[in-house]
Amino acid sequence: MALGFLGGLAAALVLGAAPVVATQTSPPDDETAARAAIMELMSASPEYAKLQLDLVKAQAGLAVRIERLVVIGLRCQLLSEEDAQLIIANARDEMEFGQSVLFEDQQADFALYHEGLRQGAFVAADPAMPRPDECEAFAQPGGTLVKLLTWTGRRQFIRPGIVASPRTIP
C-alpha cells in the first residue's frame, strides 16, 4: 500500500524535510493576538519565557513521537498516506506556533534541540517491519491507532459510543 511513500516519509523525517501542509489553522487575527499576548508575557517575565521554551520542547517530543507512530501505522498498512500527512502536519502545527513566539536566542537553542531529538528518535527506531502481533496491538480498540487518528481532526471512537478526545496523546 504505502511502501513507496513510507520509504520517502522515513527519509524525509530523518532529514527533517518532510513536505507537509498545515490544514487546521486559526484565523490570522486570533493567532496574531495570541502570539502578541504570549510575547508580552515572555518579555515581562524571564520565568515565563523559560516555561514557554520548556512547553515547546515538550511539544517537539510529542511531534517526534507522533512521526514515529505514523511510520509504524504505515508499515502495518493501517494508515492512509493522506491521514499520515495530516497527522504529521497537525502535530507540527502545534509545535511551530509555540516555537514562533520564542526569543531569537531560544529559537536557535530549540532548533538544535529539535534536530537532535528527531535524529535520536529515528536512529533508535527499529527499522524492521513490525510483526503481525505488533500491528494487531497497535490497532486495538482504544489503542495507539485510534489515538493517532484523533490528530486528523475527525471523530474517533475508543469503543462504540465513546468518543476519543481530539488530539489525544498516543
Image (spheres, helix red, strand yellow):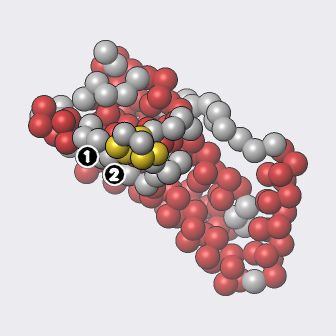
Report x, y in % for residue 84: 45, 31
Residue that appears at 34% across and 19% down: 2
In screen coordinates, is 2 left or right of 111?
left
List x then y, in percent, for residue 71. 34, 35
Q: Which residue is mark 2?
A: 121
Residue at position x 79%, y 76% in the image: 41
Whether residues under marks 1 and 2 lie with C-beta atoms below 8 angstroms apart, the answer is yes
Whether 148 is drawn above or below 115: the answer is above
Q: Is residue 38 left or right of residue 84?
A: right
Which mark, by number, is residue 135?
none
Quarter of the image holding residue 98?
bottom right
User: Where does the N terminus fall, quadrant-wise?
Assistant: top left
Q: Is residue 60 visible?
A: yes
Q: Secondary structure at mark 2?
A: helix
Residue shown at 26%/37% (left/top)? 139
Q: CA distance from mark 1 to mark 2?
A: 6 Å
| 149 versus 65 height, above or below | above
Residue closest to the eye, 163 or 62: 163
**In the image, what residue type sits under mark 1?**
Ala
What residue is pinned by disc 1? 125
**Amino acid type of the residue tagged 2 in the rendering:** Ala
Relative height, residue 144 to residue 76 (above, below)? below
